[in-house]
Image (spheres, rainbow, N blue to C red):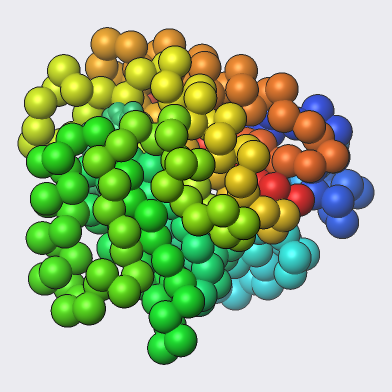
Amino acid sequence: MLSFRYRFSSFATHAPFTHSSSRRLFFLLPPQTHTTLTNISTDHSLFCLKPIKQNNGFFSIANNIHSSSSSFSKDSPFSGLEDVFVSFLFGKKKATDVAHMVWKHVVQKGDTVIDATCGNGFDTLELLNLVADDSHNGYVYALDIQKDALDKTSLLLEESLNSYQKYVKLFNICHSKMEEVVQRNASVRLVAFNLGYLPGGDKEIITRSETTLQALEAAERIVIPGGLISVVVYVGHPGGREELETVETFAARMSVEKWICCKLQMLNRPCAPIPIFLFRR
Ligand SMILES: C[S@@+](CC[C@H](N)C(=O)[O-])C[C@H]1O[C@@H](n2cnc3c(N)ncnc32)[C@H](O)[C@@H]1O
């Protein structure tokens, strides 16, 4: 029997989705009695999904998604994202998959974006594919404090695209200094953080609350309206929980008029990675 608790909370205390304040908030609710519905925020709509009963007695989520129209208004940053959210709920998608899907809804060809923790380069590659266009306007700034990480990122990019240098600039620098490398007056659509240590690398070299906070503050200054700060937080390593608290506290204090802040947290998987999205209105 499926039994899980799931929480999708908004840090903002006032209606974050301006055009949908009248809608109700529903969480995906499998029919089993063990399932717990946690409704954190009753005054805003985030998404609304109803399982459909099949002939075999099982409930179909995917059919429901594909047969129903989106629960979001077209201008919602979550429009079209139900599928990936549901897959995440059921353990079929990772936190980074959710982040990538959200990026797709925010980033446009020709945009400038920052990968604040490029690591092995998977996020940078995803971003490159989103911004690269024939006019070569799109740009990814990829930052990491480890030279090893930058080497891995450039190798991955090289394998994927011959002329990636036109679109990606790598910096061996702490992300708290992102404003020093990004072109002045650049319109930054997205700053992406994938916190923690480099997979396959030295687990002692991790992102730290203090510099993460400084980097978030820098990101807040440079992200343009309609943009996003995306953070995937890992709490399974020493310092991870403290870092989560730092990100949450930062997000909770952001202006409700300017930012929509939310996180996706599995309540019965305490070490599961946590995607956090800070949308600039
Ligand atoms: C989880 S990994 C990132 C994974 C990466 N985005 C990918 O797609 O493979 C975290 C990375 O953050 C880097 N890092 C740690 N502290 C940092 C800092 N202050 N500034 C920039 N990068 C940092 C680590 O070196 C590590 O490579």
Q: Position of residue 107 (x, y in %)?
A: 54, 65
Ligand 1 position by quadrant: top left
Most distant residue in the right direction: 22
Say which residue appears at 45% left-offset and 72% top-offset.
Answer: 138
Q: Please say whether residue 122 is visible from this viewpoint.
A: yes
At 11% from the left and 50% from the top, the residue drawn is: 151
Picture quarter containing residue 165?
bottom left
Residue placed most toward the observer, 231 or 44: 231
Q: Is residue 197 left or right of residue 89?
A: left
Residue depicted at x 86% and y 51%? 18
Residue 72 image-quadrant placement: bottom right
Q: Residue at x 25, y 72 (%)?
A: 164
Q: Quadrant of residue 133?
A: bottom left
Residue 40 visible to the viewer: no
Q: Position of residue 50 (x, y in %)?
A: 63, 54
Side (left or right) of 196 relative to 155: right
Q: Position of residue 233 (x, y in %)?
A: 40, 30
